[in-house]
Each structure stands twice: as structure tokens, then as C-alpha cells.
Image: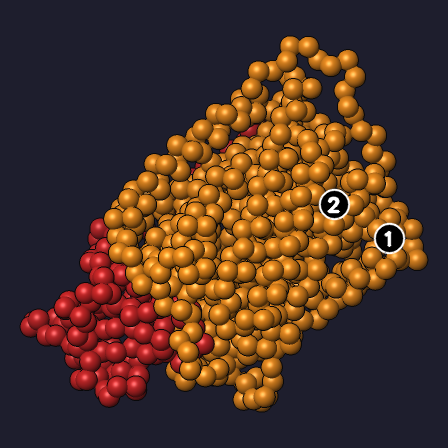
Chain colours: A red, B orange
Amino acid sequence: MHIDRYERAWLTAVGIALGAFAAAMAAGFILFGIRLPSPVARINPNTFAGTPYANPGIKSLGGGRYEVFMTAKMWSFDAGRDSGPVGVPPRVKIPRGSEVTFYVTSLDVDHGFYIEGHAINLEVIPGQVARATVTFMQAGEFNIICNQYCGVGHQVMYGSVVVQ
Amino acid sequence: MQLSKETPAVLPVLELPRLAMLRDERFLVGAHIITAFAALSIGALMGPFQAFHRAPAFVEAFPDATIPVFSYYYQALTAHGTLNALFFTFIFISGFSYFMVGRSLRRKLWSLPLAWAGFGAMLVGLLMMLFVLVTEPQRSSVLYTFYPPLIAPPTFYLGLVLLVLGCWITAANVIVTANLWRKEHPGERLPLAVFAAVANHWMFIVSSIGVAVEVVFLLLPASLGIIDRTDPQLSRVLFWFFGHPLVYYWLVPAYISIYTVLPQQAGGKLFSDPLARVAFLMLMILALPTGVHHLFADPGVSEVNKAIHTFFTLLVSIPSFMTAFNIGATLERAGRARGGKGLFGWMFTQKWTDPSVAAQLVALILFISGGISGIINASAQLNITVHNTSWVPGHFHQTVGGIVALTYIGIAYWLIPMIRGRALFSKKMALAQVYTWGLGMMLFGHTMAEAGLAGVPRRSLTGISPFLDEASKYWLNGAAISGVILLISVTLLFTNLVLTLAGSPKPLADVPEIQTKGDPRSPMLLERWGLWVGILAVLTLVAWAPVFAEAISATQGFQILRFLPTGVPMP
């Protein structure tokens, strides 16, 4: 089949560009440890109460590492009573420089879990535990936003991480 | 199938006049195209109002403003998604496929009654969708992705089932008709438009199995109360098995126009017919093993599967890069033949004042940023920064709202006059529509992308969100300005189409001629459909079996929660 020489050159350039994209992704994965969510645990809503995911809150692992357990339901996040009273968008307080692993579960429908300015963006799906780790290097308050449609109150479902 | 050795003495060749349509053709194509644009008229009208209600400045200035027809924001959003992205596109694709197949092959369809049955199914499906959206605004507001455990009333799903059934009938009709023609014309290549349509409909048949299984076995029984549980992760996997091929199902008919009609309209000839066929085959084969790139943020799919689908996603961008070259070269030759000089002079000598050509050229320009933002979405790690933010609708309004919808509009600017038998009502109005659409979508895409990078979620009534920072508000207000431009464009479009259908005083002067021959230099290997569909099936199995294995082992039989717990007030 005849291929024009300019088209050959174009396709070669496209091939090199796509190869570079693939290499950049591999480098992000291997060298910089940027990970995507992957299966952690499945939860059955009928036996949910007995699991560690049922008690939202912040757990210090020592050495500047924390685990934050959160639940999502129409139309609020819950991060336990250390982060504020029931019914008020939670404010999760974390010291600057901490490496935090979030475990988020949904009690009803699909929700989203996105923290402004940080590479953390999860689908929170009933029956699954969504997990991601992020390091907070900068002081300030960063919104946690539900970014998956979850019904009429979706637009007011949020919270925040306060980095001190 | 065994090919007959004897060629029939008299081939059933239809004499099709250039400007007029045969009776059967006019009614069948006309019914589809007009119904499709009727669906678009409602769906597209919702868009600008959503942009207004997402803008804090608008909500502050007009706190009591409501959206017409579908007054509840998420109801309007569901209407916008289902009517534009599913009903408009699918019904248009069927009508346009029938037109192109009939004209290119100069042959009757395999079954006209079946084609009408398919149209009937799609029309009833559309009416059911409209009915349920109007009568049950809260429960039917599940958006066009309808992820459970949100469960809509049964009518919602039955409407979709009928729509897909209609598409299957079109697919069967197109594929069998093309096969009959091949038997009658041994050794000849299918005309490019039919080749592409066959590839597209095969891809649709295979991919729609995912959404059909989801709706028929998971969602509809749950909605009817036959089962009381569902699995949200499995549902999302089934949906996106279909969801990414869906975008190529929209795109290929636009490419059919750009590859087979635009070159002639622009005053030139397609640069390479064989490479166009390679591009269409690549789209068909690689459309399926890519869907997991919509699930990068899902907890129930492992990183290995995400990596495999990322690899195929990079490959599936190649046919669009090939298109950029092929069409770019075609337009350059046409532009130079019209007197364009120098490196860029040919761009200025295009037929920018012909509405159909202008629509397709503007659509191609929108696809530059739409396509590049698509590669960003597909890059697994960059996706984390944009997933579910308003970046995503910014991207797909330049793709499905740009290259797809605007090309379909460009087709309608000659096809609807041809159906009516009179000229387009106003060329100037059409040109104004095309350029306002291009400007509006460019601005909307840009402002939504910027808002997304500032953290604004997609699919949210952000006009009343309490958490927006100044940058987010700025870009959302900018998106509302693009809404004004697009509202003007939508008004111009439907005024012009309605007046054209009412009967323009001017007679129909010209329509593009449809090619009836394939390029004999194109390798016969490309016509071996058994081989290509086989490769499609194998790649699909290899890429998806592990994803389904994970999802099925994850199935916990989650209890269904009805969409709105009773007693929740409307905002």
C-alpha cells in the first residue's frame, strides 16, 4: 500500500510522541511512585459495622504518617468527631509534612473524593474501599469535594483538610 | 457465507437523481434526521441554562431564575445528556447510515420494513424518555450514565432498551446490505463511506452488549422491584465496556462526512482512500480495549488492568492523527487549487462562507484542543488531576459537542434541504450559527477546563456551592458567557431548520455528490470482515476478561437504596 513520504514522517513523529507519553507514564509510576487506586477491600453493607472502615477518624501511625478513615453519604462526609460535630462539613486537621492515607467508603450511592491542589481523586463506590496516599507539604485549608453526582444535594457535599 | 459464483444478469441498481430523493428514501431518512434534530432541540436548549445556573454571578443576580421545561437542575442535566448524547446521535447515525449506504451502493436496503421497525423503536424510546423525565423529575434524574445504586423508574431504562434495539436493527441492515452488494460486485471495494459504516456498526454491536447486560440484568429488574440488590462497581465496568466505543460510534459518521463528502465540497479529492480505511479499521479494533481509562479512579479495578487499557488508548489516538494528516493534506491541496499560496495561504482560501464546509472546518479546529485534552485524560496519572472535574465536560464539548455535533449540523445543512426538496432557508443564518457555535464551544471548553483545574466538580449545581474559591467562580462565570453565545447559536440553528422544513422560497440548487466507488488501490485484505471482527473480539476478550473477573469476584450483592429517600426537600 502506498504511503506518502510526508505521511510516513508524520506517523513516525506521532509514534515517537506516543512512545514518549508512555515512557513518561512509566517514569511517573516507577520513579515518582504515582499510583492509581486499586482494590483494597470489599465491604458488605450488612456486616459493615464490624469493619475498621465503619469508625471514621484519624489514626496516627507515628513518624508523620497518618491514616484517615472517612465515610460518605448523601450529602456529607464524616471523618469522626475530632473533625467537627455531626452535620457540619468535617475539617480534618493534619500537621504539615504528613503522609496521609485516606480510606473512604460510601454508605449509599456513588460519591467522589477530591482534595484541592493535591493528586487525590477517588470514586467512592458502595461495596468497595477507596484508598489513596498523599503528602501535605503546604500549610492551609484545602477543600475535600464530592465530584461524583450523588443526588439533589450533591453541590453542597464537601469538607476540608486543614494543614497546620 | 458462501459467495455465489455467478453474477446475477441484472444487478438491482437504483437510479438516484442527484438533487431529488426517492419516496422510500425521503421518508426513511427524513423521519430519522428530523426526529434526531427534534431531540437535539430540547437537549441542546438545556445546555446554556445549566451553564447559567452553575455560575455564582448568575445565581446571585437572578436567585429566582429557573430552567425552562426541565426546571430542576439535575433533571435538565439528565435531559441534556440523554437527548443529545444518546437519542440525537443514535437516531441521526441511523438515518445518515441509511442515506449513505443507499446512495453509495445504489441499492435497496436489505429490509425496509425492518428499518421502519427500528425507527419506531427509537421514536417510542425517545417519547418514553421525555415522558419519564417530565413526570418523575427526581427519580429519573440519574444522568446519562445512570450509575446505580441510583435507580430510575422502569420507563427510563425501557426507553434506552428501545433506542439500542433500533441501533441493532440499523447495524444489521447496514452490514447485510453491504454484504449483499459485495456478493453482487465481486472483486470491488466497498465505497469508503459504507466501509466505515460497516466497521462502526460492528463495533457498536459488540460494545453495546455491555450496556445491554447492565440494563437488562441489573438495572431494569432492580427498577421493577424484581431484585433488591445491585453491584455498583460491576455496573460501572459494564457501562464503560460500552462507554468508550460509544464515542467512536459518534465520531465515525462525522469522519464519514469529513472523509467522503468534505473533500468534494471543499473543491478537492481525498488524499488517501486506503489509509482512511486503515484508520476506520483501527478505530473499530481498538475502541473496545480502552474503556478502563474511564475507571482510573475506581477502587475495584487493579493497576495492571488500568495500565493495559492505557496502552491501547494511546494506540487508538493514531487513527485520529492519521485523519489529521489525511484531511489536512486534502484541504491543503483544495486550498492551493483555489489560489492559496505560501505555507498557510491555503487555509484562507477554503470555502469559509459555505455553511456546510464551514461547519466541518470549525468542527476540525475544535477537535484539535478536544483531541489533545483527550490524550491528557488518557494519561493515567494526569487523569487524577482532572477526573470528574469540569475539565471533562470542557473536553467533551469540544469533541462530541464540537467535531461530532457540528459536523452533523454541517451535514443537516444540505441533507435537510434535500429531504424537503427546497433550499436552506438562510445561508447567512447558518454561517452565523456555525461561527457562534465554534466560538461558544471554544470558550466553554477553555473556561470549563480552567475551572476543573481550579477544582470545580463536573455535574454539579455549583452556582449555590459553598466551597468555591475566587478562581473557580471566575471561570464558571466565564462559562456562563459562553452559554449566552451558544444559546444564540442554538436559536439560530432551530429557527433555520424549522423555516427550511416549512419550505424555503428558493429552489434546491446543489447538494454534494455521494461517491459510489471504492479506491481499487486499496488492499483487498482490508475487506476481510471476518478477520477484523475476529481480532476485535479477541482483543476485547483479552483486555476485558480480567476486569470482569475482578468485578464479578467483588460482587457483594449491595442493597439498593432508592434514589431519593422520602422526605428530602428539593433545593
> Camera-side residue: B555 or B522?
B555
Residue B29: mark in rendering:
2
Q: Secondary structure at mark 1?
A: loop
In this view, the mark in front (1 or 2): 2
Q: Is residue B387 visible?
A: no
In the rendered image of this protein, does residue B32 appear above or below residue B73? above
Element at label 2: helix
Which of the 4 image quadrants contains residue B558? bottom left
Query: In the rendered view, does B135 fall on the left or right side of A136?
Result: right
Which chain does tag 2 point to? B
On the image, numbered disc 1 is attached to which residue? B423
Place of residue B515 in the rendered image (x, y in percent of width and height, measured from the top left): 73, 33
Q: Nearer the viewer, residue B66 or B110?
A: B110
Identified by mark 1, the residue type is: Ala
Q: Is residue B531 above or below residue B172?
A: above
Q: Residue furthest top?
A: B5
Q: Position of residue B13 (x, y in %)?
A: 78, 25
Q: Chain of mark 1?
A: B
**Are the residues flagged by discs 1 and 2 in contact, CB closer than 8 Å?**
no
Give coordinates of residue B221: x percent, y percent: 43, 55
Residue at 60% x, 85% y is B65
